[in-house]
Image: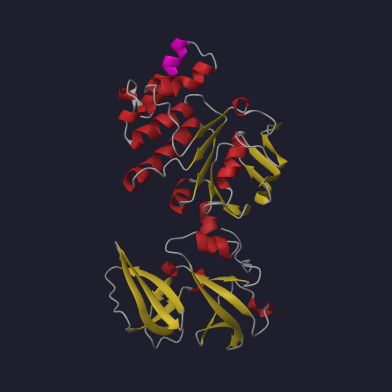
Amino acid sequence: MEVRLERLSKSFGANAVLKALDLTFPERKFITLLGPSGCGKTTLLRLISGLERASSGSIHFGSERVDHLAPADRNIAMVFQSYALYPTMDVAANIGYGLKVRGVPTSERVDKVGAVAKVLEIAHLLARKPRALSGGQRQRVALGRAMVRKPDIFLMDEPLSNLDAKLRATMRGELKRFHLDLQTTSIYVTHDQLEAMTMSDLVAVMNEGVVQQFATPEEVYDRPVNLFVAGFIGSPPMNFCDVIVTEQAGRAALVLAGRSFPLPDHFNLSRLEEGRRLVLGIRPQDVVLAERDDPHAIPGSVWMVELIGSERLVEVEVAPKVRVCAEVKAEVRAVLDSPAAVAFNPAKIHLFDPKTGLALPRSDGPL
């Protein structure tokens, strides 16, 4: 079911947590609300569920306005970070509790609980209490309680945050599979960009109560609309450097650390006055270590070297307190304080206005 938010706002006293959001979540899509702590993503999920009331604006499920309805009347299911299982009930009772409250006959309830438990591979745990389960098993029970009701909208508030890294990686794939099996609209809250990028059809990047960008994971990564999105998405984070517009061989160019280099045609720099200051963004994966005599390379010295498995991060200081990080293969050797140089993949350069933070338009358009 489609979820539509119109001018939705929420304040706690003088603190505006959400600010006039206009968003439409398409039906049957996996949508992630991504952002740092305090950005308003959990508050938004609670408004959609009915656990909080909006200060202004409206919420629509399909053609029906629902912000006046109690949570029980919205046909939603929610999985919390804490799982919120009943400790005195066994797994079967936890999964089937919502059906029992709605008066579903015992035989039908047993059949539905058994079917969901089979899908989640916890049928052998139905007689156990939550305290006898591992974190991953409790996760599945919480999911089963939500799935058994066949909700129109499935809400998840950081359900993987209490799991270890290996189990979290496994559960990401399982959650995506459950979403496809349910054929429902799923809205997922996380501060973990890896979860957002690997699981989602659409990502809403939030900061300070505002949706900064709402797009596919690919577009958010490759076409960030502003400095916040560019810096928040990607690991290791994007490099940012102050640059100045100049002219080189009759075309617009940029100066960084005293070295100028031309820009590709996807930026119309002919409209930018010479001497204008911009912020250049480039991801470490798009930076290479180059020869110091390369005319398009920026010389410096190695500031930091960090091994991260099959890759190595090499940070080069190209000017006082101006450092550029390159992600290279682990076989590439770099010695601290040794001479080095970096060069950029020109097709992957981003430019931002330092005053507004907005990305400069590109002629190659969206993905």
Q: Does residue 244 appear left or right of residue 163 in this picture?
A: right
Q: Does residue 21 appear left or right of residue 156 in this picture?
A: right
Does the rendering let one see residue 223?
no
Q: Residue at x 62, y 53 (%)?
A: 211
Query: Which residue is nearer to you in this view: 326 or 357?
Result: 357
Q: Quadrant of residue 153?
A: top right
Q: Residue at x 29, y 68 (%)?
A: 330
- 224 relative to 240, above or below: above
Q: Does residue 330 appear left or right of residue 198 in this picture?
A: left
Q: Quadrant of the N terminus?
A: top right
- Pinpoint residue 151: horizontal percent, then vertical percent: 54, 28
- 216 relative to 78, above or below: below
Residue that lies at the very extreme toward the front in this rendered image: 13
Q: Residue at x 26, y 70 (%)?
A: 331
| Dominant secondary-structure state across the stretch colored magenta | helix
- 345 relative to 18, above or below: below
What range of the chain is rendered magenta?
106-112
Q: Does residue 265 appear left or right of residue 236 in this picture?
A: right
